[in-house]
Every structure is written in structure tokens, then in C-alpha cells.
Amino acid sequence: MEIKKSEIKGTTKVVGLIGYPVSHSLSPLMHNTAFKKAGIDWIYAPFPVHPDSLEDAIKGLAALGIIGVNVTIPHKENVIQYLDEISDEAELIGAVNTIKVRTDETLYGANTDAIGFRTALEKDGGFEIAGKKIAIIGAGGVAKAIAVVCALSGAEKIILTDIVEEKCDAIIKIIKKANKKIKSAYYKSGDAELGQAIKGSDLIVNATPVGMRSNDGSPIPTAWLPDKGFVFDTIYNPTETPLLKSSKQKGLKTQNGILMLLYQGAAAFEIWTGIKPDIKVMKEALFSSEK
Ligand code: NAP
């Protein structure tokens, strides 16, 4: 039997992902490819952490010599209480998706979902947020990051909708702090006026998980789609959700969440290592997983 030499050594630095579940994640593939390309002796590992064990897991990071972690569903908000300092943006959003263990063992939290969304939309999608009317479907964790970055980037108006109206109200309060001039409105999902509000938007963002499961439809009826504009789905698996499919059929510009994942990962890489990753290589790794 041929014995393959392990690439993990006694000196290997460890980062990873804390969430529940984490088995679906593309982040290990993306980061481990980028570490290899950068020629640094680092690995990115998945850590499934049950909500009951979150405090123990976070406290154990420094003890284990872990350099940092990404944080995903369902811990992005709860984790803040265990950190020593968080970025202004993460404070405003109220969620952290990247933790760095500093050399003095204090824990610093940031939110790179917001910059990931903006970079994907503006750089690759060619859509400028400033001055636009933006409708966000779903008012959970990722919607908060998207709403804040849209408000900070000078959006004219933000419309929110969720099954639970209070979640929209809470986000509106946050975005008003970020941008005093911004106009806003929210509707309970299924509300009669919601269709008109969405139809008048320049950008529609799906920030719900609706479209991930094989029997899912679109989170909004096709009749609500505007005649022109942009539709962004935060979902990246499947690559084309029913919402994106019907938007494309209507001639709208569309984008899925894969590049948002890429840029949030690139920002996290830089926070941990202090060096810029090779974006092209990270992107190739992500797209290879789609084949
Ligand atoms: P979340 O916190 O659970 O938020 C989703 C929200 O949407 C919940 O408030 C949910 O309400 C609401 N919702 C569900 N169905 C709806 C509908 N038909 N109409 C209106 N609102 C509805 O989840 P999250 O962390 O924000 O993640 C949302 C999605 O973003 C995930 O599926 C993931 O694919 C994507 N995401 C992508 C990236 C990326 O980098 N591309 C990063 C993070 C997340 P209930 O709780 O009442 O169901």
C-alpha cells in the first residue's frame, strides 16, 4: 500500500468554521486551496458546534491555539456575547461571521458578509447601490448585513418583508442609524401591497432559504417581478433557484450567492493571515465544486 505523506504538521496553523450543521460548507475547499496557493502552512477545518456548546467552543479557541474561525447558522448573533471586541460594522449589524484570536488571546469579531455582498453585486454584477430602491425578502441574519451595507452605500430606499414583521422593524431601526436619510417600508409576507412595492424596486434580494430545497418554489410570485432591474439570490446551491430562473426568463439581470461567499471568505482570510488571498484560485475552487 502506498502511504501518502500528510500535509498537516506539528507547525500547521488551524482556522475553521463553527456552525450547526457545517457539513454542506464550501469554505474548507475554498480556504484550503487558497492557503496552498499562498504557500502557507495553514488548514481550515469544519467544527460542528451544537448551540448548547457554543460558549465552551469559543472559550476553547485560544486554549487550542486556533487562529480564528468563521461563524455560521445558528451562531452569528449569539456568539457576540463571548467576544472581547467587535468591528463597528458587526456592532451595527448585530452579527459576527469571522473571529480572530489575537496574540494576547482576546477575541475580535467582524462581519464580512456585508462586504461580500457589496463586492459581488457592484464589482461582478455591475450594479451600483447608491440611489437605488432595494427590496429584501427575509429579515434574518444575512438580510441584516445586506440592509446595513445598502444603507451605508447610499441606497435611496429599502423595503423589507418577512413572515415575522417584528424582524423587519428591528432591521429598519438599525438602517436608520446607519443612514438617517434613507427611506424604508416593511410588509408582512403575502401582504397585498407588497407586490406593488417589489415591482417598483431596482434590486430584489432573496435573503430567505426558499429555493434551496428541490421542491421549493420562488419566495415571491413571478407577477411581482419588475419589468427591468436586478435580482440577487444569496443562495448558491442550487446555482439557479426558481426565483433566478423566472427572473432570467423575464429578461432581468441575475446573480446567485457564490461570489458573495467568495468575497466574504477572502475578507476573512485577510483578517486571519494579514495577506490578500489569490481570489482567482479561491473562485476556481468554488466553481469546481459546481461541476
Ligand atoms: P435566517 O436567519 O434563518 O433568515 C431567513 C429569514 O427569512 C427568516 O426570518 C425566515 O423566517 C424568513 N423567511 C423564510 N421564508 C420566507 C418567505 N417566504 N418570505 C419572507 N420571509 C421568509 O437565515 P440567514 O442566515 O439570514 O440565511 C438566509 C439565506 O442566506 C441562507 O439560505 C443562505 O443560503 C444564504 N446565505 C448566503 C451567504 C453567501 O455568502 N452567499 C451567506 C450567508 C447566508 P422564519 O424564521 O420565520 O422561517
Image (cartoon, grey):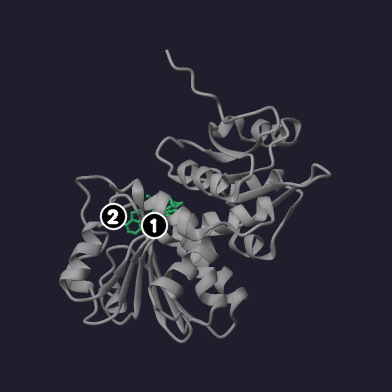
Label 1 element class: helix
Amino acid carrying label 1: it is: Ile
Task: Tell which of 160 and 64 is nearer to you.
Answer: 64
In screen coordinates, is 131 left or right of 68? left
| Ligand 1 closer than 8 Å to label 1 CB | yes
Task: Tell which of 204 and 110 is nearer to you.
Answer: 110
Q: Tell me which corner region of the image, top left, top right, bottom left or bottom right, holds residue 36.
A: top right
Mark identifier at residue 233? none
Question: Going by the picture, which residue comes out furthest to the front?
Answer: 2
Task: Tell which of 150 and 268 is nearer to you.
Answer: 268
| Ligand 1 closer than 8 Å to label 2 CB | no
Taking the image as four quarters, which one is ligand 1 found in?
A: bottom left
Q: Which residue appears at 53% of the width and 71% of the height?
A: 149
Above or below residue 180? Residue 63 is above
Above or below residue 108? Residue 226 is below
Q: Residues within 10 Å of mark 1 (few under 14, many from 20)?
A: many
In screen coordinates, is 202 left or right of 93? left
Q: Residues within 10 Å of mark 2 (few under 14, many from 20)?
A: some
Amino acid carrying label 2: it is: Thr
Sequence-earlier tag: 1 or 2: 2
Tag 2 residue = 239
**Mark 1 and 2 residues: CB-CB less than 8 Å, in contact?**
yes
Q: Position of residue 83 (x, y in %)?
A: 72, 47
Q: Which residue appears at 53% of the width and 76% of the height?
A: 151
Q: Position of residue 92 (x, y in %)?
A: 63, 65
Mark identifier at residue 258? 1
Q: In the rendered image, is residue 166 in sight? A: no
